Image: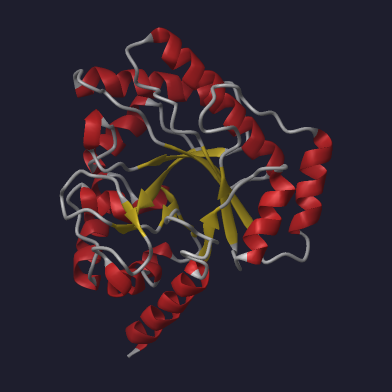
Amino acid sequence: MLIGAHVSPAGGPAKAVERGAELGCEVIQIFNQSPRMWRPRHYRDDEVADYKTALEGSSVSALLIHAVYLLNCASEDKEIREKSLTSLIASLEAGDKLGAVAVVLHPGSALKGKVPPAIRRAGKTIKQALDRTEGCALHLENTAGAGGTLGRTFGELSELLDAAGGGPRLGICLDSCHLYASGYDVRTRASLDEVLDRFDAEVGCDLLGSLHFNDSQSGFASNVDRHAITGSGELGDKGGQVWLSEPRFESLPCVLETPGVGTDKNANAVAHAMALRKKGLRSRRR
């Protein structure tokens, strides 16, 4: 497993590598454009070259790009869907240039509308983005389920994949906080095994391509997406050990999106996660 964190790309993707290396990351995740603006960001050739140079000799060996939260590929508003498509295409193009593992996408929200047509709209938008790009994979992220968000169940994830036409570039990113908040208990080995068996049956573990490890401020099946500093939430350090040492997660990139990573508030987040992994692996060998 590659463990790392979401970092700022301010100053270009090479700076993101530097920030990740300072935290001891093996993988980093970035937004490829401002999360508050629709304007897509296109990396210049010199920025790509600097990024690849920064990787050399660095602890960072993998990159995920997270599509910004403004996107709603399922919106009933055609203008929003078009803006979402343009932004998603830019993310996939950036991922191809930088050699990212994948772009991670929140599939969208039905808001107050019906879910089945929202899934169809999201699938169509996602398929258009994949058809207009090449190379970089796209991982649909499970959601906590608030506000009509799509992907709160494995069944919805499967329907989204089908609606988008499937294919080798489509996969899944599982988020521990979102699973817990949407009613999947991932706190113990036994419960996580059961959850992953269900995922395998409904979606397929072969489609699992990336992970987010986030502790949860909110309770089980609350449908509230509130990340907590690792070890301080509902999952706790024991839940972290279970997640980070799960055999079916081996070789996958796993990103922390916890509050204050790299600041005085949460300076050792990545090192803490790596220590939890080691404890979990030792426990499994007994």
Q: Is residue 136 left or right of residue 146?
A: right
Number of labels in the image equals 0
Snapshot colouring: secondary structure
Residue at 65%, 28% (x, y): give it: 41
Residue 193 visible to the viewer: yes
> Which one is nearer the viewer's eye here, 95 or 182?
182
- Indicate the quadrant where residue 283 lies: bottom left
Residue 1 visible to the viewer: no
Where residue 270 appears, as percent x and y from the top left, is 51, 67
> Which one is nearer the viewer's eye here, 282 or 261?
261
Rendered view: 21 above or below 106: below
Rendered view: 286 above or below 64: below
- Give the residue furthest to the bottom: 286
- Indicate the quadrant where residue 286 lies: bottom left
Residue at 23%, 54% (x, y): give it: 180
Q: Is residue 218 left or right of residue 33?
A: left
> Which one is nearer the viewer's eye here, 227 or 51?
227
Residue at 25%, 72% (x, y): give it: 189
Rendered view: 247 above or below 15: below
Residue at 20%, 20% (x, y): give it: 112
Where residue 81 appears, as percent x and y from the top left, is 43, 16
- Give the residue furthest to the top: 78
Where residue 233 appears, as percent x and y from the top left, is 28, 63
- Give the residue furthest to the front: 264
Where residue 162 appears, as percent x and y from the top left, is 34, 30
